[in-house]
Image (cartoon, rainbow, N blue to C red):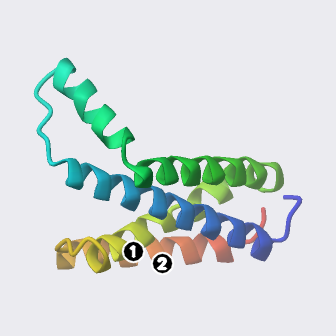
Amino acid sequence: MKGTLLYVAGLIVLTSVCDTINHLGLKICVNAVGMEVTGPASGVRFVLRVLRMPLAWISILVAFLSLFLWLYVLTMADLSLAFSLDSFHHVLIAIASWAILKERVTPQRWLGTSLIIAGIILVALSGTG
């Protein structure tokens, strides 16, 4: 591993934040369109309606930023470490879905999210090898 663990972990947290912003933005757009997709034609209409929304384009741009950060991370870290630490976006999505989208998160899902956090800590403590 070329980068320090703290630096790499910080970049991975940044990619997770970008992923969370991307997914939240797209979910908000999809909810705003409020259209049921029943086949290819309505699917195309649905996508075109979503793409008319500025938030959708901001979300797409943030997704590209996340991709570029991720590619940079991969130049510095073993894939097994980077991919394991990247699970942090599951934690952020659960929190953001609950706090921003007002979705109900069940106790079982909070337990699962807590286990993901424990796994991330174990992977991070395992070192750079």
Q: Nearer the viewer, residue 74 or 79?
A: 74
Task: Give the image location of residue 74, x and y in percent.
Answer: 75, 49
Residue kind at label 1, given as amino acid type: Leu
Residue 118, above or below 39: below
What percent of the width, then of the height, locates residue 119? 50, 71
Q: Is residue 112 left or right of residue 107?
A: right
Q: Is residue 36 depicted above or below 76 in this figure?
A: above
| Dot 1 crowding, Cα within 10 Å, few <14, some 14–19, many 20+ | few
Residue 65's x, y, as percent? 65, 52
Answer with left or right where residue 96 lies relative to residue 38.
Answer: right
Give the Cα separation between the discs numbered 1 and 2: 5 Å
Q: Quadrant of the N terminus?
A: bottom right
Check the image and report above or below for 32 versus 114.
above
| Foreground residue among 50 and 80 | 50
Residue at x-position 31% and y-position 75%: 100
Residue type (three-letter) at the residue carrying disc 2: Ala
- Residue at position x 77%, y 56% from top? 77
Q: Nearer the viewer, residue 97 or 126?
A: 97
Residue 116's image quarter? bottom left
* The disc label shown at residue 71, or none: none
Foreground pick, 68 / 58 = 58
Picture coordinates of residue 118, whole percent (x, y) = 48, 78
Disc 2 on helix, strand or loop?
Answer: helix
- Placement of the C terminus among the 4 image quadrants: bottom right
Question: Quarter of the image holding residue 120?
Answer: bottom right
Q: Residue 104's quadrant in the figure? A: bottom left
Residue denoted by label 1: 115
Task: Tell me the element at label 1.
Answer: helix
Residue at 38% from the left image edge and 79% from the top image edge: 114
The answer to the question of whether label 1 and label 2 lie on touching residues, with beta carbons closer than 8 A, is yes
Residue at the spot 48% in from the left edge and 47% down from the top edge: 57
Disc 2: which residue: 118
